[in-house]
Amino acid sequence: MEKVNGIELLNAGEQGLVIEFGKEISEAVNRKVHQLARRLISEPDMAILEIVPTYRSLLVYFDPLKISRKDLSEQIERIAAEEKMFHSEESKEVTNIVQIPVCYGGEFGPDLEFVAQHNGISVDEVVNIHTSTPYLVYMLGFTPGFPYLGGMSEKIATPRLEKPRVQIPAGSVGIAGSQTGFYPVDSPGGWRLIGRTPIKAFNPAATNPFLFAAGDYLQFKPVSVDEFFEIRREVDAGTYSPEITSLQKG
């Protein structure tokens, strides 16, 4: 299908419309995804039921009894055509950086030494590289609140396990290829585990169940075993608040 105003529209069932911005995974493409998501959320007359951002596309669920696919497509194309709408280099966006404390290695990170050996560096170098930069949350999925993060250094990239683990404890931090992230809930998984965070990224009992959103940044911060359990106690008592700073992009 031909692109119109830099986007490509694809059908996804009777109530779904996919807006694609490109074929590659990049921060610039993902920023456009979130720009359009925010814009559509502010359009109450478009009968949109749900918006799902991904690495390079946006899935929009709409009410076909209130708006036709043709009318919705035309409105989205109109928004895409507006001057400067998707020119990310001209925007000045402020996003959150959420600090994620992580206790690396030991029983919390059983694959940390393998990651170091695979890349021919020390365990300390793996931790230093992993904590050296904030990572963009490209999208959430797999399990509630699971962040797919981009921008990890190829110096610590490591293939997935040949045989996934049946159960991984919530908070486990992993690497798969050049991706990194952590498991918000107990689940199976095949990522190499290098550490664990004591914080909860998903709390269904909270007013806002998710600690962060797609478009935010996460920065991992190394903590000791004692600090891990101290933070865990604060999390369980409901007294822990993660450090959140601002980052201006663009």
Image (spheres, grey):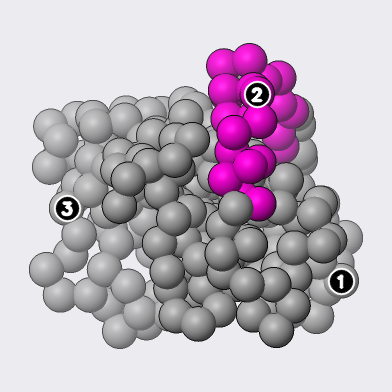
Q: Which residue is mark 3?
A: 159
Q: Position of residue 41 (x, y in %)?
A: 76, 55
Question: Residue 83 got which mark?
Answer: 2
Quarter occupied by the C terminus:
top right
At label 3, counting other C-alpha atoms closer than 10 Å, the crowd grade (few under 14, some 14-19, many 20 or more) is some
Residue 217 point in image, percent of width and height: 60, 39
Q: Which residues are magenta?
A: 75-96
- Give coordinates of residue 185: x percent, y percent: 54, 75
Taking 186 as reference, is 203 left or right? right
Would you say the residues marked 3 and 2 are in contact, meaning their CB atoms lie under 8 Å apart? no
Residue 80 picture quarter: top right
- Residue matched to label 1: 207
Q: Nearer the viewer, residue 58 or 198?
A: 58
Q: Is residue 78 magenta?
A: yes
SS at mark 2 in the image = loop
SS for callout 3: loop
User: Is 139 displayed left or right of 250 in the figure?
Assistant: left
Numbered disc in front, either 3 or 2: 2
Q: Amino acid at mark 2?
A: Glu
Between label 2 and label 1, give the one nearer the viewer: 2
Mark 3 vs 2, N-terminal side: 2
Of residue 75 and residue 222, the one placed in the foreground of this image is 75
- The residue that appears at 63% across and 42% down in the rendered structure is 78
- What's the CA distance linking mark 2 and mark 1? 37 Å
Mark 1 or 3: in front is 1
